[in-house]
């Protein structure tokens, strides 16, 4: 009888454990979170330097760690591995990741940038997108510059197969361009601003509307389990964003220090960066959807994918109460 009772107890424990999610079992408490910071997300530099998030989470016993993302692709890798809970990407890059199975939600927008363009050397014969046919082009796959490149090619009757793609992380792409190892580069600020001002690189194709918004992403399950922490992070981001708008000299200085830029290069990046619209709203949905549709037409996204549904699954506007009024 004792053995039978133990078996029944164990069986019951298994059933309870299996049913716990359905019964609304509270999520495990969080003692630490990790966020990324990035040169292409200047608000993150202010937030990291000021320590406001650490202050906000200290009463809850939650510590904060920061890691650098070198591009949207790296932020997605961090999110997928669970090494960060919050990662900075371009909106279109987040959409591609979501379509490819990354369980992320975009909960906040840190900027509306013109952070990418097609770049060549000042003495290069390349003058137009059409001139890229057969040329070597450096790009970081899975990022807004990659998506910008594909859309630019498609708009001018070309495809990825018409160029020789050289896959490099952003900073290495810039170095390859300056070293004339490639003919062009799908650039990203602040490296693009550096190349433009310091090495005479030329932005031969610009189209701000093809740049998608900078968004802060969070693991979908983490957002479901810990909405109060997501809201705290967004409130801290809002504190940093509004401070950055009110103190542009400090913002520029933070970028100079973090990225090792000249003051002029930091100013060039920031003059192309709009920090005024943090909400996940209809304009952002429209811009990211347009990028997704273009990528589907270009064959990057499979024809059977419901792009509009994927955009809606990615964007999460429920934390709008945390935004500055």
Image (cartoon, grey):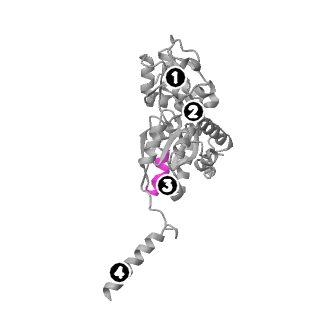
Label placed on residue 222: 3
Mark 1 or mark 3: name the one nearer the start of the chain. Answer: 1
In the image, which is nearer the foreground, mark 3 or mark 4? Answer: 4
* Apparent side of residue 269 relative to residue 68 in the rendered image (left or right): right
Q: Which residues are magenta?
A: 52-61
Label placed on residue 53: none
Up the image or down, 151 lies above or below 227; here it is: above
- Point 53% across, 24% down: residue: 162
Q: Which residue is mark 2?
A: 247
In the image, which is nearer the foreground, mark 2 or mark 4? Answer: 4
Is any part of residue 59 visible from this angle?
yes
Disc 1 and disc 4 in contact, CB within 8 angstroms: no
* Apparent side of residue 74 relative to residue 162 in the rendered image (left or right): left
Is 56 magenta? The answer is: yes
Q: Secondary structure at mark 4?
A: helix
Q: Position of residue 24 (x, y in %)?
A: 52, 68
- Point 55% across, 37% down: residue: 300
Q: Secondary structure at mark 3?
A: helix
Spatial distance from mark 1 to mark 3, Cα to Cα?
A: 36 Å
Crowding at label 1, few (<14), some or many (≥20) Cα neighbours within 10 Å?
many
């Amino acid at each position: 009888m004792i053995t039978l009772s133990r078996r029944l107890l164990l069986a019951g424990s298994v059933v309870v454990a299996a049913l716990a999610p359905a019964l609304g079992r509270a999520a495990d408490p969080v003692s630490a979170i990790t966020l990324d910071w990035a040169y292409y997300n200047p608000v993150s530099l202010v937030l990291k330097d000021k320590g406001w998030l650490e202050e906000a989470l200290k009463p809850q016993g939650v510590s904060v760690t920061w890691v650098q993302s070198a591009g949207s692709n790296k932020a997605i890798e961090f999110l997928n591995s669970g090494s960060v809970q919050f990662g900075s990407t371009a909106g279109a890059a987040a959409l591609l990741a979501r379509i490819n199975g990354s369980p992320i939600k975009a909960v906040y927008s840190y900027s509306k940038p013109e952070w990418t363009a097609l770049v060549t050397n000042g003495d290069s014969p390349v003058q137009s997108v059409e001139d890229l046919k057969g040329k070597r082009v450096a790009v970081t796959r899975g990022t807004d510059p990659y998506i910008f490149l594909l859309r630019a090619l498609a708009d001018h009757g070309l495809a990825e197969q018409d160029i020789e793609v050289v896959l490099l992380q952003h900073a290495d792409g810039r170095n390859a361009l300056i070293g004339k190892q490639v003919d062009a580069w799908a650039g990203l600020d602040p490296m693009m601003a550096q190349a433009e001002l310091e090495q005479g690189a030329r932005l031969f194709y610009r189209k701000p509307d093809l740049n998608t918004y900078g968004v802060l992403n969070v693991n979908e399950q983490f957002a479901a389990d810990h909405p109060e922490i997501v809201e705290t992070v967004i409130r801290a981001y809002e504190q940093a964003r509004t401070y950055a708008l009110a103190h542009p000299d400090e913002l520029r200085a933070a970028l100079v220090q973090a990225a090792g830029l000249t003051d002029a290069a930091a100013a060039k990046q920031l003059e192309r960066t709009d920090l005024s619209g943090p909400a996940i709203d209809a304009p952002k949905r429209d811009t990211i959807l347009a990028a997704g549709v273009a990528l589907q037409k270009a064959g990057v996204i499979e024809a059977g994918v419901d792009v509009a549904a994927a955009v809606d699954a990615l964007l999460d506007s429920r934390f709008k109460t945390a935004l500055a009024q």
